[in-house]
Image (cartoon, coloured by chain):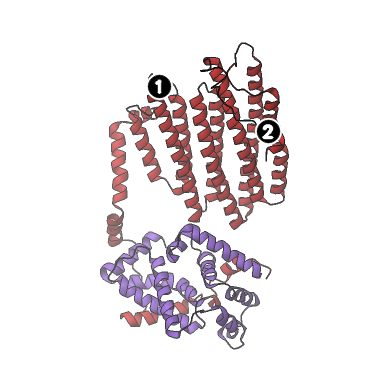
Amino acid sequence: MNKSPFKQLKRFKHDPRFGGMDEAAKGASWAKIAAAIGVDDEPVEAPALQGVSYGVWLLTQYLSKPVLVGTFSVVVIASGWLTTVRASDSLPGDALYSVKKITEQAQLRLASLDRRAILHTEFAGRRLQEASDLQGESTNASESASLVHGAIEAYKQEISSAAASLRQLKDEGGVTTLATASSVQQNLQAIDTTIDAVVADSVSAEATQEALVAKEVTKVASEAATTVAVEVHEEEKTALSTYELKQMFKSELGQIEARQRFDLERIEVIRAALADESISYAGFTVPTSDELLAYEYPIVAVDSLLSQAMNSFAAGGFRSAFATLQEIDTSLLAIEAQLAQIEITIMNARTQPPAVVGEEAIEIEEPAKAEDVVL
Amino acid sequence: MSDLEIKFLAFRVYRSADKQAFSRLHELHVERIRRFVAFKVARPEEADEITSEVFFRAWEYMTSQKVDNLTAFLYKVARNIIADHYRKSKRTEPLTEERAAVTATPGSFIHDLEVHEEAEQLLTLMAGLKPEHREVLVMRYQDEMSIAEIAQVLDKNSNAVRVLLHRAKQAIKRQV
């Protein structure tokens, strides 16, 4: 058989050999039913799908939703547009924050499934921004830490909801799945860049740790979006799906290259900080120059894996190409966690003396040897 | 016709035993139900009988109970009737060998209809599949149902349907 069996199945869907029926067969079938349920031989006329009875039924069946929407609209108008606008800038703990959350919930309820997946990533970006804005906002340190932690938890929730909505869209065979996966992926990449900026600007060890947790969650959701996109393409195999996948691959590739440059710059900054004689590292465990090289090597070695991913993609091995990118992502994430640990140590050394010199020094994980790093 | 309009017709059947509404529902669904049945029984006459039985039982049920998802409901009724049919005729493997034999036997209904070569090849391919693979392929590619709709009909979750569909596609590709 030369043609795809799936296309052939569609082609023969009305063929009697495949159980299909023409009008005469349908008529004969109805005649049997009609005789059994007591309808005259005369063909019955279908009821009009308009008029009073249909209108009344529509009202009774679907009254609840318009009422909900109407009530919400009245509440929004009554409470004032200004309140909603002001609430958009509020932070957890503010009086207007609940208005912001209710507005978001309403948006989600009224959105279609594809729009919902994208909205969740947009709200995740807001939670991350809130966590960033909350840093050092309160005079009470423990209250501030608790609010930041809450915002990061809410961020994780939004990200996992985005991934779940996307998966549901795929399962329901939504025609916009691939485009939605692409949009979700773009938003996640924007969030990832924001996290990198938070790490770069961070002045506290807690913020760096929270950012790393957020990065890990984003990575999982990003992989899920890519998997959905590849699955859709494998089912559809159209020029459009190939194009969408290509755009996603290029975007992810660019993201990894940017991270590669950013991580190399971080190592340079660390190197400069360690060489700064005005900072005393006595009592702190910091990497030697050779150990820093051991972090640097696998980041540079990413180049060869990127080439491998590009070759796979060009040969049509989309799944394998994205898997290679995910592998690189995992390796970079592990190195970034270790770099963050060093940065935290440097920050501690700048701001405070070690508790007990020589005995309870802050431990840093041994850098992996270049030959042991599996990329 | 939209889902909303189908729900309205089903409501008319329930509320006032509206035969006109049921006639329209029959017209909309009969082909896919017959197709579903035809791939599970050997002879077209059996498929016709079972299809009529499905709609007769549906009428009896729908005039006394509300039905939310008519398509899923009709498939479920069809599955139950086919199961009864197998039990009565004491068949365990309904179609695979029998359908292949029918396909290959001159004089059978397929040959009587002067089948096209490609259709024959496809029927042979389908006959070589496991019943559950054949079922999910027909629903997806001939009835053009979404994964969620198939999941409802088969009483499985969406992931299970996706796996089943993937295996069915692999199975038919292997045969090609």
Q: Verify CB contact (< 8 Å) between mark 2 and mark 1.
A: no
Task: Judge whether residue A77 can be spotted in this image.
Answer: yes
Q: Residue A299's mark?
A: 2
Residue at the disc numbered 1: A141
Residue at 66%, 32% in the rendered image: A260
- Quadrant (top left/top right/bottom left/bottom right) for the N terminus of chain A: bottom right
**Which mark sits nearer the N-terminus, 2 or 1?**
1
How many residues crowd around disc 2 within 10 Å: few (fewer than 14), some, or many (20 or more)?
many
**Secondary structure beneath label 2:** helix
Q: Which chain is red?
A: A
Q: Nearer the viewer, residue A96 or A345?
A: A345
- Residue farthest toward the front in the current orientation of the protein: A359
Question: On the image, which quarter does residue B70 sit in?
Answer: bottom left
Instruction: Please name the amino acid that badge 2 sits on.
Output: Ile
> Which color has been applied to chain B in this rendered view?
purple
Question: On the image, which quarter does residue B53 sit in?
Answer: bottom left
Task: Judge whether residue A29 can be spotted in this image.
Answer: no
Chain on which label 2 sits: A
Q: Position of residue A280 (x, y in %)?
A: 60, 13
Q: Nearer the viewer, residue B85 or A204?
A: A204
Q: Nearer the viewer, residue A210 or A109?
A: A210
Looking at the image, residue B58 sits to the left or right of residue A374; the answer is left
Q: Position of residue A118 (x, y in %)?
A: 48, 42
